[in-house]
Image (tube, rainbow, N blue to C red):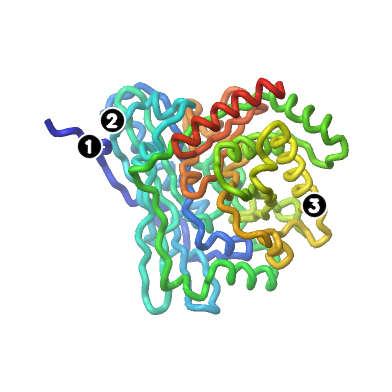
Amino acid sequence: MASHPILTVLEQSQVSPPPATVDDKSLPLTYFDFFWLRAPPIHNLFFYELPLTKTEFLESIVPNLRNSLSITLQHFFPFVSNLFIYPNPKKPEIRYVEGDSITVTFAECNLDFDDLTGNHPRDCDKFYHLIPLLGQPEKTSDYTKLPIFAVQVTFFPNRGFSIGMTNHHTLGDASTRFCFLKAWISIARSGTDESFLSNGTLPIYDRVEENPKAADGLLKFSKYETLKEDYEHQTLSGPTDKVRATFVLTRNVLNQLKKSVSTELPTLAYVSSFTVACAYVWSNIATSHNDDLQMFGFTIDCRARLNPPVPANYFGNCLSGCFALEKTTMLTGKEGFINAAKLLGESLHKTLTNKKGVMLDLESDSDLFADGLPSTMIGVAGTPKLKFYGIDFGWGKPKKVETVSIDYNGSISMNACKESYDDLEIGVCLPAAEMKTFIHTFQGGLQTYV
């Protein structure tokens, strides 16, 4: 007996801004964007619980999302543009030409909606059916042109739907994506952009002041001289033995973790809910891994920290990095969490008080890898400061939000919780055997500190 396909495409649309609303224009990349030229794409997935028939989905959800997206794109033209990579030394840019469009796929899925939206370990490759692929690069002698945004809306019969979004990281950071989503949901709920224009926040396309030294270093880091010829989109595919699980640290638990750190390290300059959450996860991942050296890093929004500062609605990437490196043996056992909190707190304090500014200095940070490249490098996707569980298109808040792109490199995701923004929701992706160890130490450790 033949099995049914997991995913069936119902409709595929090319969505553009309304006619004659956007002129041809371009947005130069800055040194903040250059770091991400070779980074894997970002995959965000929002699940909405809504008992719908296929007819209701096709006649109500599909046209609403398609039409509201079209209106939104006229205010956020880079999302419907392409990234142009030129022969060195001409710098890359995002460019819109009238007629450009993004691919929006509407599909039906027979996977278990309740399983996908749980917190328990779930097979990672199930989620890959729900995220769209970016279009293939177009290569000519003068440039390589890359589509940088795509959307997939997937219907689960009588249970709800998911909205998957994929973007090239040079399009923008989490703040930029959040600004775009806030505009989209406002327009979806009202049917026009009048409310958004009255109460929303339009993006600022002015560029940050140039930093030639940083630009040259980051273009070299990204191997820009060969990027035009050898660029290929990275993708996620199964089968894989990895599973993803979600862990919640409540405000009470976070306060207890902070208290433990402050008691052991009374002079530590920086102790926050974010840093202790990162430290606790890092120490538990270290316990589940069998390697010698580990690195943990997270990004810092630089908008308010530049001199002069740039507006909160600055469009693009405006991030610096904060990193800590340690031997795995120092991150495990009873003192592992405290050591991790010390490392992250000191690193963050050093970065924020650096007289040169918060921008990552590739030269001065080169000694970070003096002992060799660590086999485990953990990053943090997302930020609790942006309330992604507030992305309500008019059908209620998301039942679950997943950052599927953490699967590329062993990063974790972090969001403010749906139920309480003071609680933190952490997404972890690990091989199944390592996840069992992680869950055991994560839950056991909380009994020690709380």
Q: Which mark is residue 110?
A: 2
Q: Position of residue 430 (x, y in %)?
A: 48, 39
Say which amino acid is labelled 1: Pro
Mark 1 nearby-residue class (10 Å; few <14, some 14–19, many ≥20): few
SS for tag 1?
loop
Q: Position of residue 181 (x, y in %)?
A: 52, 42
In this rendering, does residue 391 appear at all? yes
Q: What residue appears at the point 66 percent right and 20 percent down from the top-left corner?
A: 447
Establish if 145 lies above or below 385. below
Q: CA distance from mark 3 to mark 2?
A: 50 Å
Mark toward the viewer: 3 or 1: 3
Of callouts 2 and 1, which one flags the residue occurring earlier in the amino acid sequence?
1
Contact? badges 2 and 1 (CB < 8 Å): yes
Mark 3 nearby-residue class (10 Å; few <14, some 14–19, many ≥20): some
Q: What residue appears at the point 42 percent right and 47 percent down from the top-left corner?
A: 70
Q: CA distance from mark 2 to mark 1?
A: 8 Å
Residue 25 located left or right of residue 113: right
**Pick the front one: 447 or 19:** 447
